[in-house]
Amino acid sequence: MQVIAVSAALAISSAAQPARQDAPAELILIHGTILTGEGLKSGNPQIVSAMAIRNGKVLATGSDAAIQKLASSGTRIIDLHSKYGTNIFVMPGLNDAHVHLGGAGETKLNVDLTGVHSLAEMLQRIHDYALKSPAGHWLSGGNWDHTLWTQKTLPTRHDLDRVTGGHPTILERIDGHIAIANSAALAAAGITGKTQAPQGGAIDLDTNGNPTGILRETAMHLVEKLVPPPTRDERRHGLELAIADAASHGLTSVQDNSEWEDFLAYEDLEKAGKLSVRITEWLPFDASIATLKQMRAHHNANDPMLHTGMLKGFMDGSLGSRTAAMKAPFADDPKNSGLARYDQAKLNAMTVERGEAGFQIGFHAIGDRAAAMALNAFAQEAASAKSPSNRRNRIEHAQVVDPSDIARFAQLGVIASMQPNHLLTDMNWAMDRLGPQRAAYSYTWKGFLDAGVPLAFGTDYPVEPVTPFRGLYAAVTRANEAGTKNYFPEKSLTREQAIYIYTQGSAYAEFAENHKGKLSPGYDADFILIDRNLLTIPASEILKTQVLETVVAGKTVYPFAQRVPQRVPQRDRP
């Protein structure tokens, strides 16, 4: 059969257009187990054996015989069982509703401390990187997590001073809400024991009143603003690595919180034909209305591969760093209730102003006090006659929410954008941090679902690995990866519910539910081929899922067939 190139330059439509049944298919998949996405929400998922694709859209799904009638002499037909075996499973592409590709790219190009299991291992990695760095070069990056260490003590500037060789250094914790800086970096920023932290931040001091090197929340910016930004080429290379990581794990769409310079680099990649995942880029809530409107107008809002989306604001920090804003103190730190970044009156005014300007708004809120403040602001916006009726505002993470506030989510139509994979890490200490009463209603995606609250799922990459299958596993088991410990397992979701949220729920959160998230006629032909049936395998096997191919707009983007010279026919890949 002839190979026909499928263009990704499609127009975003407000509703999926009915496919022309008289038009021949460009690509047909047969003899497969294809989950279309229809019926997932009701628990009766539709499975078909064949699918036809034309112009980057699903033309039709159904039986092998019916779909093969849509073939012409130029149609490419793939027998999935013949190529991959009977275990092959085709499903809609996953849509990660919360990533930081820019941060992931920078980490990949700088000091990467992901997974270090001790302070000694952390310092060795820093030492190795410092040795190969030119004099005066700032060391940045991070992703360290002291909760993985036997001794769960935070590092200090003195620890870093021993291995950084005079390089000014600042390294963020894996959650991005605290960082450790060495003495050279603190001196460059003029930080002493008398330095006043900005609102919503803190500078940790030792018993002598001197900085330990730990900077919390907004205080990190005092040093980070001094770090030279990456060059355009460096930034673009890091983003290519992060995007490739996402595509290789079955993501066809991501909703991204990175810097504006990263968005400009995405534009470069798109022009070069290297943007292999659809990206909706968030804008900074704190920017002025004028700046936000300029950003929104900068790029075609109907670009199906790249466009801007909601505004992202930060209400608080994280549970791991004890900077989440809580209504009551942490159980294991009774003098600390976390840090709120806004006062309520200012937050309300900014939210109403931005809502009236037509922006969707999403607030990072980990703690119950932070979630309540965000809901208060959304309620003020909802009361404004100038705000659009279909706001679809969001609260990102929503890890600890007072049960009385879950009903407010539903009343205000606020989406709970959550990352079930966080539980795999956090269950090691969440009970100690929260105490049994609050723990019982933490990470409560089932509580939200039962209350009628729209849900979207993601990973928070690079805070957690980008693979969505860890999140699906966590959602349906609430058990650790070894299967030896669980966290309120009665609050698990069904597999159908979890897949629905990670596809159609995430699409709804970005106003894309009419063309993303299902393999139905007129929908985007975004799908993945994996090595097992997620609906029937034992739950523990979900973690072992391997992506064989990732397809966006009918075109294979992993294993990156588009990078093969066009003169080489790709006869056996979608």
Image: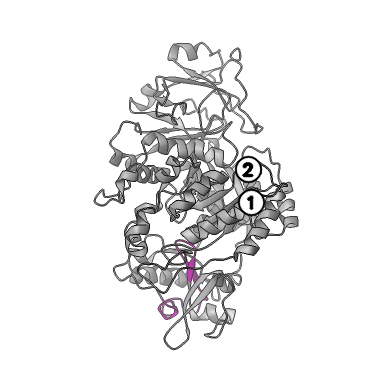
- Is 274 placed left or right of 216 in the picture? right
Q: How is the image coloured?
A: one colour
In terms of secondary structure, where does tag 2 sit? strand
In terms of secondary structure, where does tag 1 sit? helix
The amino acid pointed to by label 1 is Phe
Proximity of marks 2 and 1: CB atoms separated by less than 8 Å: yes
Q: Earlier in the sequence, mark 2 or mark 1?
A: 1
The amino acid pointed to by label 2 is Leu
The single residue placed furthest to the bottom in the displayed view is 208
**Spot occupied by residue 156 in the image (x, y as percentages of width and height):** 42, 77
Q: Which mark is residue 59?
A: none
Tell me if residue 45 is in the magenta stretch. no
Q: Which residues are magenta?
A: 156-179
**Badge 2 is on which residue?**
306
Comparing 262 with 345, the one in front is: 345
Residue 170 visible in the current orientation: yes
Q: Mark 2 and mark 1: span between their CA atoms?
A: 9 Å
**Badge 1 is on which residue?**
263
- Residue 347 image-quadrant placement: bottom right
**Spot occupied by residue 278 in the image (x, y as percentages of width and height):** 57, 41
**Spot occupied by residue 169 in the image (x, y as percentages of width and height):** 50, 73
Comparing 483 with 25, the one in front is: 483
Above or below, 104 relative to 553: below
Q: Residue at x 51, y 50 (%)?
A: 242
Residue 277 visible in the current orientation: no
Above or below, 535 relative to 466: above
The single residue placed furthest to the left in the displayed view is 484
Q: Residues within 10 Å of mark 1 (few under 14, many from 20)?
A: many
